[in-house]
Amino acid sequence: MKQLNNLHLGKKNPVRIQSMTNTDTADIDATVSQILELAEAGSELVRITVDSHESCLAVPQIIEQIRKTSNIPIVGDFHFNGHIFLVKYPEMAQALDKYRINPGNVAGGNSRKKIEKTDTNFETILSVAKKYNKPIRIGVNGGSLDASVLEDEMNLEENKGKTSDEIFVGAMVKSAISSARFAENFGIPKENIIVSVKHSSVPVMISAYRKLSQSCDYLLHLGLTEAGGGNAGIIRSSIALGTLLQEGIGDTIRVSITPQQGESRTKEVKICQEILQSLGFRNFSPRVVSCPGCGRTTGNDFAEMAEKILENLEMKRKKENWDKKYPKFSSLHIAVMGCVVNGLGEAKNADIGIFFPGKGEGKNAVIMIDGKQKNISANSSNEIEKIFFKEVEMFLKK
């Protein structure tokens, strides 16, 4: 996909972040609000569910409102009725920037007995995509894989002796590539096709994407589906996406965690950003490294300072536009350490660092800028913070 609105995908372009609304799409105000919130947080594509006549009617109005302030691509997520809705509601079909379809769901009553046979519902969707020159994502999910595809794979002589996971991976990849190639032969430009093979198991998901990337050169969207919530969901998603991205696999990503009560939908966007930044692929915000503390540290000053610095940097970005004011802001590397043992080395490797006195190291905190030490003598942590941020801004102004 060379370009989606003003967003370039694939090849040497950055790995892009996608998210999805969890509002009722028929609720226009709520959906618009969440899309803009996700875009503000850093999502570069947003997917919305199109599962009812009411949501089909709402889509053009939603996108009309979004376009007043944002050009973010809006992806329509179709399951069982996409072939009906895309034909019945041409205004909706034209308004969306991209369609997401699942071969395992789209067949409906005309389910394919063999993957080589044409599915008329799939063909109908492709006809609309071709008519309006819309990109499509062919999303094969482990939980909705076409049973006939899996059955065929299980009966192959070459698969005798393979594990059930290996056979399942082969079936997912075959389904995805078969559908993508059919779409391409139907007339959808190759650059308008993106493929995914999501699964809820980290090892299966990684294996599927590895096999897929070796078997085709379509653009790939990465995701661990049904990752769960809390720390477990974050860790599982980070392992899955990070492993593949480090191997050069993936053009767009989404973290699909279950939101905890009262938690913002934007959390999944922030996790994607942290994954990409941790791998050194992109910079979204200053990187603050800090030590965990140990028997060499006294008090909790360094931990409180690390937390305050993170909060203050976010405030500087939102209220004072430091990310726009200072080009080096998003790539800034800050170290906050609890003692001189690791503090000196870590602070030296950062753009700017601060380390606090451990046992027997006196009372003054030390700032390091460009490898040079500067002692800070202050009566409170708030005063130290103010001094530190003056130094940070002076560094950014250079």
Image: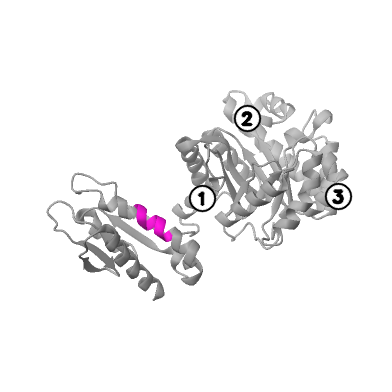
Task: Look at discs 1 and 2 and give the one toward the viewer.
Answer: 1
**Residue 175 percent coordinates (x, y):** 71, 36
Q: Position of residue 358 (x, y in %)?
A: 18, 52
Alpha-carbon distance for marks 1 and 2?
32 Å
Pointer 1 and pointer 2: residues touching (CB < 8 Å)? no
Disc 3 element: helix
Confirm whether the magenta stretch covers residue 312.
Answer: yes
Quadrant hosting residue 151? top right
Query: Residue visible at 45% across and 58% down?
Result: 314
Dominant secondary-structure state across the stretch colored magenta: helix
Q: Which residues are magenta?
A: 307-313
* Amino acid at dot 3: Pro
Residue pointed to by mark 3: 90
Tell me the quadrant of the picture where the C terminus can be found.
bottom left
Kind of residue indicated by mark 2: Phe
Residue underneath mark 1: 270
Q: Tell me which amino acid carries mark 1.
A: Lys
- The outermost residue toward the bottom is 398
